Image (cartoon, rainbow, N blue to C red):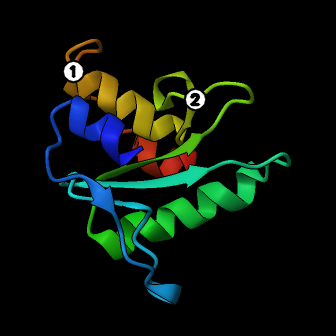
Amino acid sequence: MCAYYREAGAVHAERRALRGALDAGDVAGVPGVADSCKDCREWRLNEWLDELQAMIRNAGATVGAIWLKRRRKVSPGDAYVIMRGATYVRLLREAGYLPPENSSVDLEAADG
């Protein structure tokens, strides 16, 4: 995963040291991002998304995702990337694919 990030331009990406209860994700060196990398037969998405929210807080990050390795695939580019819907919409807005938010609806709270 870290090599994949480095190839994409995050030259300081590296495996994060374990922090126990203050888990801040699996990859360091990608500013503002907390990632959780999984290679499991059994998926526990509800649990993992809750853990991801704690990792984002612990890392002081603004965004995070779960990278879930696909069977019989090696590259992280082939992985499933899972995040909250509100996070995805925010990223679409920031990338210019959606108009700026101008409603009174708080998508982060609504997705809770």
Residue ID at (17%, 42%): 10
Q: Tell me whether circle 2 and circle 1 mark residues in contact (CB < 8 Å).
A: no
Query: Helix, strand, or loop for circle 1?
Result: loop
Q: How many discs mark residues in the rendered view? A: 2
Residue 110 placement (x, y as % from top left)? 53, 46
Residue ID at (52%, 41%): 83
Q: Residue furthest top?
A: 97
Q: Nearer the viewer, residue 71 or 98?
A: 71
Left or right of 55? Residue 102 is left
Q: Kindly indicate the quadrant of the structure image that contains residue 29.
A: bottom left
Residue 66 placement (x, y as % from top left)? 54, 46
Query: Helix, strand, or loop for circle 2?
Result: loop
In the rendered image of this protein, does residue 22 appear above or below residue 69? Answer: below
Which class describes the residues within 10 Å of circle 2: few (<14), some (14-19), or many (20+)?
A: few
* Residue type, mark 1 in image: Ala
> Spatial distance from mark 2 to mark 1, Cα to Cα?
28 Å
**Viewer-nearest of labels 2 and 1?**
2
Q: Kindly indicate the quadrant of the structure image that contains residue 70.
A: top right
Q: Nearer the viewer, residue 45 or 80?
A: 80
Residue ID at (40%, 28%): 89
Q: Name the mark on residue 74.
A: 2
Q: Residue furthest right?
A: 42
Task: Compare marks 2 and 1 and give the one earlier in the sequence.
Answer: 2
In the rendered image of this protein, does residue 27 appear above or below residue 88? Answer: below
Residue 82 placement (x, y as % from top left)? 57, 38
Residue, disc 1: 95
* Residue type, mark 2 in image: Val
Left or right of 64? Residue 45 is right
Residue ID at (63%, 51%): 38
Quadrant where the C terminus sits is: bottom right
Residue 91 placement (x, y as % from top left)? 31, 30
Q: Nearer the viewer, residue 103 or 28?
A: 28
